[in-house]
Amino acid sequence: MDIPYGRHHLSQEDIDAVLNTLQSDYITQGSMARQFEDRVSTMVQANYGVVVNSATSALHISCLALGLKKGDYLWTSAITFVASANCGLSCGAKVDFVDIDKDTYNICPKALEEKLIKAKKNNTLPKIVIPVHMGGQSCNMLEIFKLSKKFGFKIIEDASHAIGGKYLNDSIGSCKYSDITVFSFHPVKIITTIEGGMALTNDHTLAYKMTLYREHGITKNTEHFVIQTPPLWHYEQHEIGYNYRMNDVQASLGLSQLNRLSYFITMRNKIATNYNSILKDLPIKLPFIQKESLSAFHLFIIRLNLKEIKKTHKEVFNNLHQKGIKVGMHYMPVYLHPYYKDLGFKEGYCPNSEDYFNSAITLPIYPRLTTTEQNYISKTLGSLLL
Ligand SMILES: *Cc1c(COP(=O)(O)O)cnc(C)c1O
């Protein structure tokens, strides 16, 4: 047995879609990429979608479009993938971390508020806060949105785990309570374009700026030209940008994957429900589920009840790997990475995040995970813990 924690789901239709594009006249960013943007933005009811080669790039152009620069602060959750914080450093800004909520593992609105009050006194309020929808379950966006109005910061939702999920009655990505939302299409995420990402927004200017940063800072739109009566070959560079384009081969895969998004979310939720029933008697904490919303269940995270078991966190993790169950760890608090420690962060900075890190394990979850495999995982975990 070898069971990964996450795995992509490819179908013959996906492969056919990719081959079709490969055999067409146009293979780099073109009509497929535009269709992909249109379909995702329509689906989540956001006005604009800007497709790029990764969520990391999407976070970077989001920060650039919001004007993040040297001297500014960007805050994010301590428990996330490094990209949610690195985008701030890439813009020359300072990065800081907010502790998580003990139950949801999302950024804690109370901890955020307390930190904002202090920052206001010190004149170090953040320009951008990036809440991360851990495992696919939305953050408390109503509270974070209220705080953004009170303290004047912009919000980028890092929804890398959460396409297909809902917050209350809205699709994640609608940007009802944020300026920009970012999705990832890495193969372990909900849908894949091999590598890829998208930034969603309702703001025309932000969408325009993000497309500029995606393409070298170049515009081909005559309305924006500085030069009058331009020749046909003319284009202009207005900013320093990057080449963050997604090609049409990837976009056609994304379009084909989108056809099965609701199936993926249903399967992931079914698997989660089954875990909740077969694991309920073990000395672990099961994921907290917010009833009013719909988690995309990118990750199924359990917490070991270390007081009730004889093994250490590391032993349980290693033993599961030895038995072919390739569980994951999402994530070490970002500030404990050597790079961030060199910036001055120390152990003990976010206590809830460190507690979480000392007992969390991500169990396998992906659409093709079978009931037999789930039973094997449950039995193995039981034999290690009881
Ligand atoms: C995967 C992930 C990213 C980065 O996504 P890429 O598409 O691989 O660049 C960013 N933030 C979070 C929370 C992620 O899980």
Image: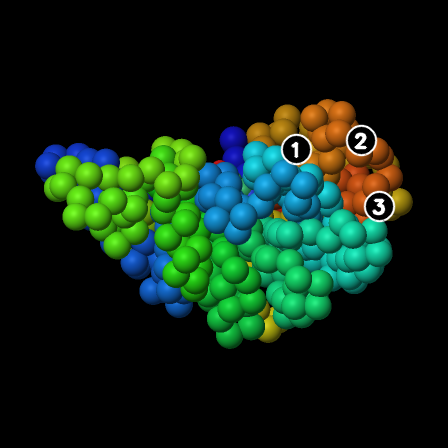
Amino acid beneath label 3: Pro
Residue 354 visible in image:
yes
Residue 273 position in % (x across, y down)? 57, 60
Q: Which residue is mark 1?
A: 320
Q: Residue 315 placed where, x, y %? A: 76, 30
Residue drawn at the location 21% of the way across and 48% of the way down: 228
Examine the image and state in which quarter residue 30 appears.
top left
Question: Identity of the amino acid at label 1?
Answer: Leu
Viewer-proximal residue, 314 or 67?
A: 67
Vertical arrangement, residue 149 with respect to residue 132, above or below = below
From this view, report whether residue 303 is shown above or below residue 288.
Answer: above
Question: Pointer 2 and pointer 1: residues touching (CB < 8 Å)?
Answer: no
Q: Is residue 112 above or below residue 168?
A: above
The label nearer to you, 3 versus 1, is 3
Q: Residue at x 73, y 25 (%)?
A: 338
Cα separation, mark 2 vs mark 1, equals 35 Å
Crowding at mark 2 (Cα within 10 Å: few <14, some 14-19, many 20+): few
Judge by depth and name the residue closer to the eye, 153 or 4: 153
Residue drawn at point x = 56 percent, y = 67 percent: 177
Q: Quadrant of residue 312?
A: top right
Mark 3: give few (<14), some (14-19) or many (20+) Cα within 10 Å. few
- Identify the element where label 1 is drawn: helix
Residue 164 in the figure: left or right of residue 292:
left
Q: Which disc, if any, is residue 344?
A: 2
How would you rate the neighbour count of disc 1 (Cα within 10 Å): few for under 14, some for 14-19, many for 20 or more? Answer: some
- Name the front one of labels 2 and 3: 2
Question: Where does the C terminus fall, quadrant-wise?
Answer: top right
Q: Which residue is mark 3?
A: 351
Assign a secondary structure to mark 2.
Answer: loop
Q: Position of residue 278 (x, y in %)?
A: 64, 55
